[in-house]
Amino acid sequence: MLKLFKVLALYAIYGLIVGEIIVRVFGLTSDIPQRTITSDHIQKYIPNQSGGWSDGDHEWQVNERGWAGPLPDSFDNLITIVGDSFIENLMNPDECHQSYFLKQNFPKQNFLEAARSGVTFIESFEITKHLDSLQPKYHIICLNDYNIKESISNIEAQSDITQFNTEKQEFVYGKMKAPFAKKILYSWKFMYYLYNRFPINFNKTDDVPKVDTYAIPYLEQYNKEFRSLLDYVAANYTIEDKILVLKPTATKELAALLESYGFKVVLLDDHGEDWTFGYDAHWNCYGHEEASKQITKALKSLNL
């Protein structure tokens, strides 16, 4: 029996080694950048990382300031672009980023993207404060209804993202979940491939219909909480230098509410075209370029 266990263990080790080689050689998993948390509670990436994306031929990079993508040549005439994974955009090469497209349209301006998967509406404003030392002319913040809902901890508390409790009027700062375990998982490519390929779900949800979270009328359902959050934002942040870009999945009602607070709002329209990847809800290169055209039109109205 002991001999059998030794043989099985040997084959298991051999299988792990071969699996790791295959996954790395054929790029079957994406590299995930490692995060850190700054002294002002901003989750960003450890600077100067790079890695591959399994569904693309490009390599993403994290710059020396801890954000995905290249830094601008200068911080003069700066405009920042803040958002979640749509702006972080690891799934596209650098030439398919908002900063690249907008720079083509405004060569005298410089653009810095500051984005991360999971960024909430309220954290976007905290990130703009984090970037104010660079004296940008404007902050472009990309979001939709869901980013605002996720901001409010008394609607649904989530420990790994920055939220705001509208009842207590206080921040609940996000913490990184199992950073050591994630570091091992992301470094062990074969195990990460198996984790993505065969996810383990301990909840029996076979009979529960899938819900399109973007289609839920959050504004109607959580109107009181949304307005309380916006009251806090209007009282504690500068409004004049913020341009809120709403994804095509956002509602016109949200756009009207934000405008009532004095925000400059751009509600993107995808014209029914396919802005997203076939396997993923994020924008492909075409989607980013089309979004940049609509953002460009809004910026030109500001006489840039």
Image: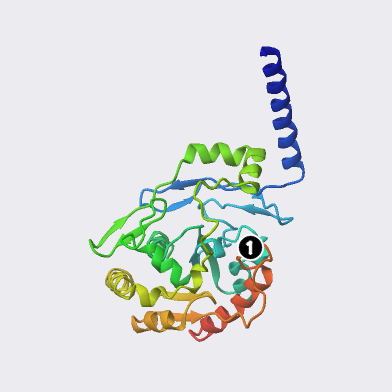
Q: Which residue is mark 1?
A: 280
Please state which of residues 265 and 24 is positioned toward the viewer in this rendering.
24
Residue 78 visible in rendering: no
| Image: 278 above or below 239 | above
- Callout 1 amino acid: Asp
Residue at image point 57% right, 62% down: 72
Determine crowd level at label 1: few under 14, some 14-19, many 20+ residues with C-alpha closer than 10 A. Answer: few
User: Which residue sits furthest front?
Assistant: 207
How many discs appear?
1
Q: Quadrant of residue 96?
A: bottom right
- Considering the numbered disc 1 on the image, is that residue within a helix, a strand or a loop? loop
Applied colour scheme: rainbow
User: Which residue sits furthest top?
Assistant: 2
Residue at image point 56% right, 84% down: 297
Position of residue 257 in the picture relative to residue 75 (left or right): left
Residue at image point 44% right, 45% down: 177
| Image: 292 above or below 38 | below
Expressed as whole percent of the image width and height from the top left, the position of residue 127 reads 41, 61
Please state which of residues 203 and 184 is positioned toward the viewer in this rendering.
203
Expressed as whole percent of the image width and height from the top left, the position of residue 228 reads 28, 71
Expressed as whole percent of the image width and height from the top left, the position of residue 247 reads 52, 74
Position of residue 220 in the picture relative to residue 251 (left or right): left
Expressed as whole percent of the image width and height from the top left, the position of residue 216 reads 46, 73
Quadrant in the picture for the N terminus: top right
Residue 2 visible in rendering: yes
Position of residue 148 in the picture relative to residue 85 (left or right): left
